Amino acid sequence: MEAKKAAKEERQRKTASDVPGYIVLAIVAIIAIIVALTITILIKGQSTPFNTFKSNFNSAKRVAIYTTAYNGSQLSSALGCSTAIIEEITGNPSIHRNSSTIDFFVLNQTSCVFEHGVGGVITNYTYNSTVNCLSSGKGEPSIFVNYSETNSTVINPMSLYFSGNSQFLAICGIASELG
């Protein structure tokens, strides 16, 4: 009888001592889940719904399109997508935007070529620093088309960042979404 009582007390003592371990483990798991969710929300939560950007873009008096690339083959891909975007927003009857209200910028590491209003034959390109070009379109809803080995789209209320490799930019899915 004494042995049974001692064994029962030993089981209760072990169970009681294990409870704090389970509680600590549960608290650590809950903290890990909260941290993971917070990081996910911060990373993904900063993106705005596409329709919010599209509405701001379509209702603005002027808009800017930036193309960034660092060599000829990258530039070719990025310019192709930028051209598709311009063609979509100027040629689509439902959202027709006058081409003179589009500011177009092509940037590399050190300089920028731009034109305010891309209507008609483009003959009045201006050269400037990348900083000045980025400042020039500030306050306008802007689309940034960038060559990158990583395909991604980040949307904010006043800006859309569309980056990708040659194949991704050749498809240029964002152009048809603007229509």
Image (tube, helix red, strand yellow):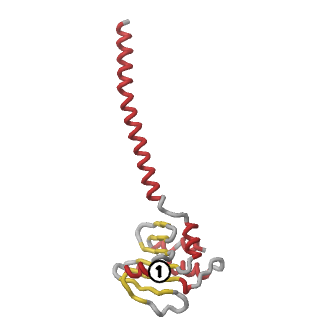
How many residues crowd mark 1 within 10 Å: few (<14), some (14–19), many (20+)? many
Q: Position of residue 65 (x, y in %)?
A: 49, 78
* Identity of the residue drawn at 48% across and 93% down: 123
Asked whether, in this view, residue 88 is left or right of residue 167, the answer is right
x, y (%) of residue 28? 38, 40
Quadrant position of residue 110: bottom left
Q: Locate the C terminus by quadrant.
A: bottom right
Residue at point 35% right, 9% down? 3
Number of marks in the image?
1
Residue in the image at 55% along x and 91% along y: 120
Residue 36 picture location, percent across and down: 42, 50
Quadrant of the snapshot with the N terminus: top left
Q: Amino acid type of disc 1? A: Leu
Q: Of 157 and 165, which appears nearest the observer? A: 157
Compare residues 12 and 146 and report the one nearer the observer.
12
Seen as rendered, the residue at the extreme right is 94
Q: Residue at x 45, y 67 (%)?
A: 151
Q: Is residue 55 left or right of residue 17?
A: right
Residue 49, above or below 179: above
User: Dot 1 corresponds to which residue?
Assistant: 79
Rendered view: 34 above or below 123: above
Q: Position of residue 109 (x, y in %)?
A: 34, 78
Query: Relative to 169, is 129 above or below?
Result: below
Disc 1, SS: helix
**Placement of 48 over or under 20, stated as above or below:** below
